[in-house]
Amino acid sequence: MRLQIRLKATNKELSFNYNYPLFASIYSLLRLGSEEFSSFLHDKGYKIESKTYKLYTFALRLENAVPLKDRFFLKSPFADLFISSPKIEEFIQAFVMGSFEKQTISIIDGSIRTGFQINSVEVLPEPEFTSGMNFSLLSPMVISTVAESNEKLQQYYFRYYDDIAEINRVLTNNLINKYRILNGKDTDGAVRLEWDQDYIKYQTGKGKKLTRKVTIHSHRHGATEVIGNVLPFRIEGSVDLIKTGYECGFGEKNSMGFGMAREVPSA
């Protein structure tokens, strides 16, 4: 299920690195709705093999904002927070209950403090899932692997121009793990993603970057830099895995606000 939460800012600045503070604020709303579930999700999550998943994603879309040095200037106070999870009874209901109780969201990153009033909460209709769909990204898609660099194994974040076969291998494995947790069974399905080449040519021709670097814990020791891709794509293959990606997020770090996509209907 996917929600659209209409927000109104009480001030005019928002940090570029809002992902972690917004993640923390979402957990505070979950805690009001269900302290038991929020503690489980934060402390344990859903585990499979050596990996842990939260099975939700979110994206914040600003109505009209101007980027400055380290923050956005909000020319319009309005924004939309999209939240998606297949865990309706646990996650969605707890979040809605917390939202109605608190009715505010705070995003605090160092000295940049932004408050939002929750004006409305709406359930969005699901698309019809098929074996071939076009999507645009509401938040950057993060896909990574472990690669050797300077004789050390390090995490490498794929860019859209990297080997698409390797991107699809990692993406498929990620979606299979989420599917197995949700359904309690395995699948031999696979997906094949293709970035929108016309969009790449047009935007890079104007000098626009199609990757975005986000710093998690930007004001703490041990800050992490994450690199995601922000461009439309087509995905083909298993309907179950495509639906899983839509509901939980495509790629990694979904609970930090990465990998949320919405359908672009075919012309």
Image: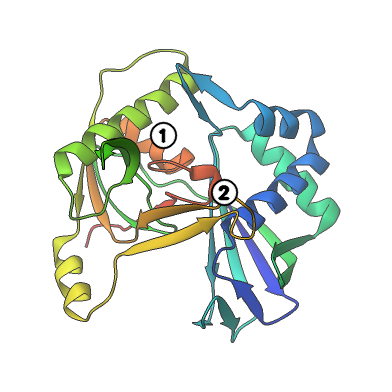
- Camera-nearest label, 2 or 1: 2
Q: Which residue is mark 1?
A: 244
Q: Which corner quadrant of the image does residue 27 belong to? A: top right
Vertical placement of residue 144 versus 226, above or below: above
| Element assignment for label 1 | helix
Q: Position of residue 70 (x, y in %)?
A: 54, 76
For the point 56% across and 34% down, the residue is: 54
For the point 36% across and 31% down, the residue is: 174
For the point 79% across and 40% down, the residue is: 31
> Looking at numbered disc 1 in the image, what kind of residue is underneath it?
Thr
In the picture, the quarter occupied by the C terminus is: bottom left
Q: Is residue 122 visible?
A: no
| Element assignment for label 2 | loop
Q: Is residue 189 left or right of residue 108?
A: left
Q: Position of residue 24 (x, y in %)?
A: 69, 50
Near-viewer residue (182 or 228): 228
Q: Is residue 17 visible?
A: yes
Numbered marks: total: 2
Near-viewer residue (165 or 119): 165
Q: Which residue is mark 2?
A: 222
Q: Is residue 38 left or right of residue 151?
A: right
In the picture, the quarter occupied by the N terminus is: top right
Vertical placement of residue 131 versus 177, above or below: below
Q: Is residue 249 left or right of residue 194?
A: right
